[in-house]
Image (spheres, rainbow, N blue to C red):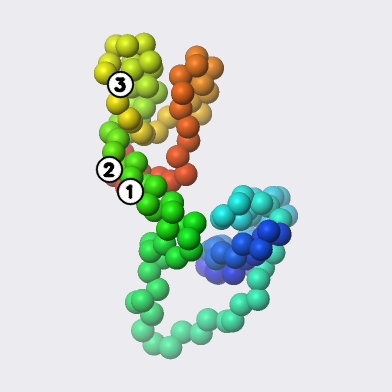
Amino acid sequence: MIQYSLKCAEGHQFDSWFQSASAYDKLRATGHVACAVCGSDKVEKALMAPRVGHGEPDKAKDLTTPKSPAEQALAQFKAHVEANSDYVGGRFAQEARAMHAGDAPERPIWGEAKRDEAKALIDDGIPVAPLPFTPTRKSN
């Protein structure tokens, strides 16, 4: 694994991990490397210092703690969604459809839906939106 500091054409800087240097090159060439902030695929490696290990790994570097303002805002949004809505897992499409039809009480929900299920909800005029995070809870 290799970590690169990256910078998009808009000036946003972020880090990302890749399986190898050649994996990064291949992904970038096919347009699969995008800015973590704005989504631009015009991304280049930024100037970075090499990381050389000295015995024990640095325990202070927690990859799950949000660093940038965008990561912090996303973490706050995720916490708000999880605290103020019901997680329905893979039953999302069925629950949304039942609420839309009046067969279930309306409430804020979130979960997972297959692409064709989500498209069918949208085609049927049922308001849904993708969330930019994965669930904290494990789904069955």
Question: Residue 82: x percent and y percent?
Answer: 31, 42
Going by the image, does 67 lie left or right of 84?
right
Of residue 70 and residue 89, the one placed in the foreground of this image is 70
Please name the amino acid that badge 1 sits on: Ala
Q: Of label 2 and label 3, which has the lower sequence position?
A: 2
The residue that label 1 is drawn on is 79
What is the distance, in whole Å, between disc 3 and disc 1 at their CAs? 21 Å
CB contact under 8 Å: marks 2 and 1: yes
Please name the amino acid that badge 3 sits on: Glu
The residue that label 2 is drawn on is 83
Question: Residue 24: x percent and y percent?
Answer: 64, 61
In the displayed structure, would residue 112 be above or below residue 80? above
Helix, strand or loop at label 3? It is: loop
Residue sitting at 36 percent across and 34 percent down? Answer: 111
Question: Residue 117: x percent and y percent?
Answer: 47, 23
- Tell me if mark 2 has few (under 14), some (14-19) or many (20+) residues whose alpha carbon lies within 10 angstroms of its own: few
Q: Using the rendered view, name the quadrant where residue 100 is placed.
A: top left
Helix, strand or loop at label 1? It is: helix
Q: Of label 3 and label 1, which has the lower sequence position?
A: 1
Question: Residue 32: x percent and y percent?
Answer: 64, 50
Q: Using the rendered view, name the quadrant where residue 48 is placed.
A: bottom right
What is the distance, in whole Å, between disc 2 and disc 1 at their CAs? 6 Å
Residue sitting at 55 percent across and 65 percent down? Answer: 15
What is the distance, in whole Å, between disc 2 and disc 3 at their CAs? 17 Å
The residue that label 3 is drawn on is 106
- Tell me if mark 1 has few (under 14), some (14-19) or many (20+) residues whose alpha carbon lies within 10 angstroms of its own: few
